Image: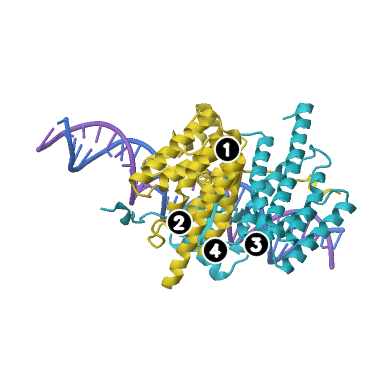
Chain colours: A cyan, B yellow, C purple, D blue
Amino acid sequence: MDQNSLPPIQTTARDDAVLKALVGFVRAEALQPGERLPTERILAERLKVSRNTVREALTRWEGLGLVERRQGSGTYLKAAVSPDMLHLPLTLAGGNDFTSLMQTLEIRRALEAEAAALCAERASVADITEIERKLDIMEQAFRTRDGMSSEEDWEFHQAIYRVSGNPLFEQIIAAMHELFHRFWEHPLGVRDFGHASFPYHRTIYERIAARDPQGARDEALKLIATVEDDLKRGAAKLKFLGQT
Amino acid sequence: MDQNSLPPIQTTARDDAVLKALVGFVRAEALQPGERLPTERILAERLKVSRNTVREALTRWEGLGLVERRQGSGTYLKAAVSPDMLHLPLTLAGGNDFTSLMQTLEIRRALEAEAAALCAERASVADITEIERKLDIMEQAFRTRDGMSSEEDWEFHQAIYRVSGNPLFEQIIAAMHELFHRFWEHPLGVRDFGHASFPYHRTIYERIAARDPQGARDEALKLIATVEDDLKRGAAKLKFLGQT
DNA sequence: AGTGGTCCAATGGTCCAACCAATTCCTGCA
DNA sequence: TGCAGGAATTGGTTGGACCATTGGACCACT
């Protein structure tokens, strides 16, 4: 007898049900990020559940960054929601800053190379001109502000992820990017961080424009390698100064 | 005047305080993953807070995958905790159609290849014997149950991710894996799904044992390619039957 | 008109005391 | 000895209460 054909009935799934109802509500009302959703008391009354149950559900959403709660004001939507969302709680444990950053770079190396290759395969002519435009903006910013072009740099990469045709690349790498910057903001660190990666942006673009997936992949790998080198230099410097 | 020099003050942080206390408790008691931590009622009494507050804190941990709650049994630790943990809740807007599955495979292809290469670089002798053990278990299960070895197959791959030394590989690929299976479990689909990937498990192992990163990467790519082929065959079949 | 002060209703945060539901364990019967 | 059945335990839910913060309305004074 196949036990799997008898899934356990769902007697208790209150807070999950609340979340599903909330997804429905957000979609029905076409709520945009930033808008306020009903108060906990109203939700509890409408859904015929206790306010505590509503709060547990909202706590889960808050933990996922989907929602923000402000006491005295209300609960606000922070991101778009859809019925079939995949929640991926990444926990980077155990380590000092350096190993954590290297781990994010290992992920980014794999994805960046793949995205560049896919981009070279699939880019239309319009896509290529768009990427070139971002590249020009970045290069100009780099020259005028002497290396401080992180914003324009990031936009160039994002354009590549978008052209790759797979939104997962942008979402995952964006998470890595944020995690990386959360550490790198503080003043300590090598001064000309990122300088070495500069020339590879153009070579990546050239390989994409030439519809050369393998070449684009190789150039992307070189770019990440320069970032890893910078990171190692920064770590060595910190170690030398006796810091953690 | 610099407005940024006046960050908002922090007045209340009850549940955050509870979580910090819990981190301290877990470390003080040296709790290992799988062990049970105190009941909500005891925690509430010891920490001099309401049980609701304890529940909100535990709900957050549960959302992060750090803890698992079993009604009637207790709350169990699921992963190691440390004071300096970085949580990055990533929510992917994934659909359940063919293109979404292909997109998860593109991510998995990139990460699987990188993980296999890193594994080949860093595996110790003990690591290699452990991977070989998982491989033997999987191959035996495959033969005796005629292809139904998804559980053992997955454990083989997980062993590789672990040896790669970067926990992010396992976390991200596990999410892709879950998303994939959430769709593939139901009966429709090609019957011998996964058969074609079977021989490449051993070739991957052989390249890892030979400390050949590039070879391991190539074999991993071949394995994913067979899965992509299976998926395309399944999609064509569904299309032929007039389904979505 | 603008500035600051006071008040008040709305809202999230916390607390309490129950009861429900699933699990675990142990007792007593066969 | 084995096992059926009933506590005891534990997370899940409820309803009600109060606190802390917010933001707007209103007002007095400049």
Query: B234 or B179, which lies in front?
Result: B234
What is the chain identity of the residue bearing mark 2? B
What is the chain identity of the residue bearing mark 1? B
Residue B68 shown left or right of residue A65 in the figure: left
Dot 2 or dot 4: first in sequence order is 4
User: SS of the residue at dot 2?
Assistant: helix
User: SS of the residue at dot 4?
Assistant: helix
State the CA–CA distance, disc 2 to disc 4. Answer: 15 Å
Quadrant hosting residue B134: top left
State the CA–CA distance, disc 3 to disc 2. Answer: 31 Å
What is the chain identity of the residue bearing mark 3? A
Amino acid type indicated by mark 3: Gly
Q: Are marks 1 and 3 in contact (CB under 8 Å)?
A: no
Q: Which marked residue is nearer to the observer: mark 4 or mark 1?
A: 1
Q: Which marked residue is nearer to the observer: mark 3 or mark 2?
A: 2
Q: Are marks 4 and 3 in contact (CB under 8 Å)?
A: no
Query: In the drawing, what numbered circle is on residue B182?
Result: 2
In the picture of the structure, the residue carrying the numbered disc 3 is A34
